[in-house]
Image: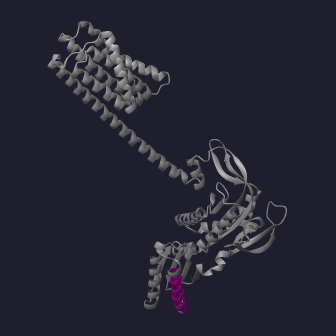
């Protein structure tokens, strides 16, 4: 009784591509020497050559099998397949040269064999092997002269049938080698298609994996600048922590789908800002965000600290736009983030096991940044004295005195960020106005030029509708811009002021945003 699995179709065994190429080359060599053997045999049959030359015919027929064994032995000794093939092509030339001498240099048969052997040399290796092939063909002719003697058959003495047979043999070889070349081209195309598929899969996979790694680390890993091994180092970094105040309580009141959309939109916006300033996003812990500056790429301690603070300021501004968007989605709670920043010498690198590691930071100064975040007021940015010393020339801060921080024996001097000095010089660059039924948030520096006309049309249309219509609903959002109008909630006495604010915003955009 046969086992149950005997009827199952067994998987087809994958053939070694080197063995397939070697076998195909053997077929072409066999065809080459069969043609030579047939021509010489026909000459013997027509009594043009002595019967003793049948020994040469036997050698011509046996050589392809010997050549296959030689190729195998050369590869076993460490020679590459292409190198072994070139050596055999030169041996072919010597043997064909001897065959031409055996044919007594009959014109048409000799030319046919010369074309065959030299065409094979060109297709196998190129110009240099072909030139060597010519030389070795001459060597073979010399060996043949020694063996067969100096005899030349005049063209008129060569039987027509032998000439015809030589041309037929040449045609058969050309057809066979063309089929071989076509097959090789097909194999190359299949290999290229396979490599393209593999490359696409690798790119798709790397893009998916990149979402789980900071872009800086992903880029260095794929460029070979960094290795995935357990190693750490001490560097001066600036660390950022933020979270949404009261998020745990808010999450209990919101449906799961709405909570998920809120959290994802928040984290997406915060990450986008962090990457724009060059921060390394370490991790998300619920609504909390952890970012650090100074590794794997650093612009210097002062520049890293300033970029971190500037990032925090922009995040607070972006929250105003997000709150306006969330209100349109029915989330009425006023969500605000609090931020803590600290600078110091921190251990950074890959922690964990060989099979699972995490690129992160550790140290007391990391804990201090987290404690400052929990001590910050809603909508505010609290920084340590170490960070303040690095950014005080470019950031306006308010001295908040000293605070007691859990885990630290001494009081910690802290400062609250007010604004960037560059922003204080141009306060009209950022506008944030919100009242019942109206909200306008404008950051002229972030408006993209291709959004300019759309924003201007939205402002002009909203102002016109407020003058002429009883009911107006407008919601427009773009990078650096957010507009919300609900005339049913807008107080009548505020209409004129709202139109004036939108007019000034439009003038500022026309002036500052150049196409």
How many circles with numbers are drawn on the protein?
A: 0
At x 75%, y 55%, the residue is: 363
Q: Is residue 504 magenta?
A: yes
Q: Position of residue 179 (x, y in %)?
A: 28, 32
Q: Position of residue 495 (x, y in %)?
A: 52, 90
Q: Position of residue 79 (x, y in %)?
A: 48, 25
Give the main secondary structure, helix, strand or loop, of the magenta stretch. Answer: helix
At x 37%, y 22%, the residue is: 136
The quadrant the N terminus occupies is: top left
Seen in the picture, residue 32 relative to 193 is either above or below; the reply is above
The quarter holding residue 127 reads top left
Residue range (magenta)? 493-509
Q: Nearer the viewer, residue 309 or 14?
A: 309
Seen in the picture, residue 405 relative to 455 is either above or below; the reply is above
Q: Position of residue 49 (x, y in %)?
A: 22, 10
With 101 as the anchor, is 160 left or right in this view? left
The answer to whether one can see residue 50 in this image is yes
With 155 as the anchor, is 371 left or right in this view? right
Q: Nearer the viewer, residue 287 or 153?
A: 153
At x 44%, y 27%, the residue is: 83
């Amino acid at each position: 009784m046969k086992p149950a699995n005997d009827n199952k179709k067994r998987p087809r065994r994958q053939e070694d591509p080197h063995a397939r190429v070697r076998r195909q080359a053997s077929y072409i060599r066999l065809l080459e020497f069969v043609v030579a053997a047939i021509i010489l045999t026909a000459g013997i049959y027509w009594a043009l050559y002595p019967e003793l030359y049948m020994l040469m015919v036997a050698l011509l027929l046996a050589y392809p099998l010997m050549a296959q064994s030689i190729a195998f032995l050369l590869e076993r000794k460490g020679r590459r397949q292409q190198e072994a093939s070139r050596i055999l092509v030169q041996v072919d030339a010597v043997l064909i040269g001897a065959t031409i001498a055996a044919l007594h240099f009959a014109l048409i048969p000799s030319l046919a064999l010369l074309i065959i052997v030299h065409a094979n040399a060109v297709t196998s290796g190129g110009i240099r092997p072909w030139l060597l092939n010519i030389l070795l063909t001459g060597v073979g002719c010399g060996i043949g002269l020694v063996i067969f003697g100096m005899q030349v058959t005049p063209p008129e003495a060569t039987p027509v049938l032998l000439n015809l047979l030589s041309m037929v043999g040449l045609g058969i070889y050309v057809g066979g080698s063309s089929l071989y070349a076509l097959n090789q081209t097909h194999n190359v195309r299949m290999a290229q298609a396979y490599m393209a598929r593999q490359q696409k899969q690798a790119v798709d996979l790397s893009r998916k994996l990149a979402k789980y790694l900071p872009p800086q680390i992903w880029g260095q890993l794929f460029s070979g600048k960094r290795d995935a091994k357990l190693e750490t180092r001490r560097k001066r970094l600036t660390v950022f922590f933020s979270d949404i105040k009261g998020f745990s309580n808010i999450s209990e009141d919101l449906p799961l789908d709405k909570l998920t959309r809120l959290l994802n939109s928040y984290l997406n916006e915060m990450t986008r800002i962090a990457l724009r300033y060059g921060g390394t996003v370490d991790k998300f812990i619920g609504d909390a965000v952890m970012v650090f500056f100074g590794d794997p790429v650093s612009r210097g301690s002062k520049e890293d600290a300033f970029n971190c603070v500037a990032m925090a300021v922009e995040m607070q501004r972006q929250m105003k736009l997000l709150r306006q968007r969330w209100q349109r989605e029915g989330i009425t709670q006023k969500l605000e983030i609090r931020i803590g920043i600290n600078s110091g010498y921190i251990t950074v690198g890959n922690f964990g096991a060989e099979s699972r590691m995490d690129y992160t930071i550790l140290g007391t100064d990391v804990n201090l940044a987290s404690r400052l975040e929990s001590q910050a007021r809603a909508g505010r940015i609290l920084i340590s004295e170490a960070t303040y010393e690095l950014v005080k020339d470019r950031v306006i801060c308010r001295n908040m005195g000293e605070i007691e921080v859990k885990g630290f024996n001494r009081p910690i001097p802290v400062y609250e960020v007010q604004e960037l000095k560059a922003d204080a010089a141009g306060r009209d660059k950022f506008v944030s106005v919100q009242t019942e039924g109206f909200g306008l948030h404008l950051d002229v520096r972030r408006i993209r030029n291709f959004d300019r006309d759309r924003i201007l049309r939205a402002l002009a249309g909203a102002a016109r509708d407020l003058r002429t219509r009883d009911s107006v609903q407008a919601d427009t959002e773009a990078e650096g811009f957010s507009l919300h109008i609900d005339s049913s909630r807008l107080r009548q006495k505020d209409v004129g002021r709202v139109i004036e604010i939108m007019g000034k915003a439009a003038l500022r955009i026309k002036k500052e945003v150049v196409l």
